[in-house]
Image (cartoon, rainbow, N blue to C red):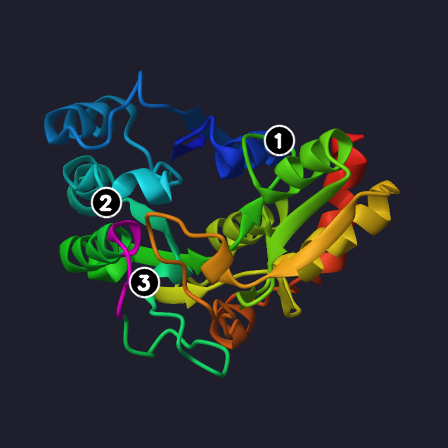
Amino acid sequence: MAKITILVTGGNGQLGRELQMLAARHPAYNYVFTDRSTLPIEDEQQVNAFFATHRPAWCINCAAYTAVDKAESDKAAAFRINGDAPGYLAAACKKHDAKLIHISTDYVFDGNSAVPLKETDPTCPINVYGASKLAGEQKAMENNPGATVVIRTAWVYSEFGNNFVKTMIRLMKERPAINVVDDQLGSPTYAADLAAAILQIVTHPHFAPGIYHYSNEGRITWYQFALAIRERIGSTCTVNPIPSSQFPTPAKRPHYSLLDKTLIRNTYQLTIPAWETGLETCLAHIG
């Protein structure tokens, strides 16, 4: 019997690399990892040709335009990759009777909530990146509503790629003091934990399409996250809390990114680790 094929786009990104690590533990599947050079997902013809050749039963879309600040001046590219491409993938999935798991973001919200965000809360992105990701969610759900799962996540980091944890480690080695914003609240997401959750959805006996939220458990600010990193790596660097107003960026950031994970936890019987556990595991891998 032929193995079921799982296509993972964005295979060299943080989440894609973590899925590569986990793939070795799930030999029942045939994994196909792609990047922009092997499958530019914003090219509809190439997407259709790829699906016709490889016939995946699942597509996990980890590919995205993730340069949040650059997106403000590069709107067309952000919307091609984050907005149009998920629609192409969803349509190809429908044509070939495949299921899609598409990764989205807390940036689809305005960050003005005071309670953890539910999947049904109104969206209102405050930057181009968020708007492009919301467009992608909508097109994916429109093109294959019966076989699409959208997972919104936040504050993703891992041992791979560029992220807050690795940046903090580097800066704490280079500088005697650093400033970190203390008025943005959320919960970090260790990409390996998200990857494990995705594979639990793939292997779950009952597939339930729809929009879900996932991050690690807990609530902290970026400043508090930096303090936790400093403590665990034994750094003597001084970490100063500052308001976002003292760290201006081209794209606005939401001040509140806490996600309510009740739906994904109950639907797919997930045990979601605390952010502290994810951080400690990641740091152990970084060494």
Residue 67 lies in quadrant: top left
Q: Nearer the viewer, mark 2 or mark 3?
A: 3
Crowdedness near tag 1: few (<14), some (14–19) or many (≥20) residues, C-alpha within 10 Å:
few
Q: Residue at 56% of width from left, 39% of height from top? A: 163
Q: Residue furthest left?
A: 45
Q: Residue at 28% of width from left, 23% of height from top? A: 39
Say if mark 1 contacts mark 3, CB within 8 Å: no
Which of the marked residues, 2 or 3, is nearer the chain's N terminus?
Answer: 2
Distance of label 1 from label 3 (alpha carbons): 29 Å
Task: Tell how many labels.
Answer: 3
Distance of label 2 from label 3 (alpha carbons): 15 Å
Please, is residue 148 above or below residue 233 in the view? below
Which of the marked residues, 1 or 3, is nearer the chain's N terminus?
Answer: 1
The secondary element bearing badge 1 is classed as: helix
Q: Amino acid at mark 3?
A: Val
The part of the chain drawn in magenta is: 124-130
Q: Amino acid at mark 1?
A: Met
The secondary element bearing badge 2 is classed as: helix
- What residue is shown with label 2? 86
- What residue is shown with label 3? 108
Q: Is residue 59 visible?
A: no
Which of the marked residues, 2 or 1, is nearer the chain's N terminus?
Answer: 1
- What residue is shown with label 1? 21
x, y (%) of residue 244? Answer: 49, 60
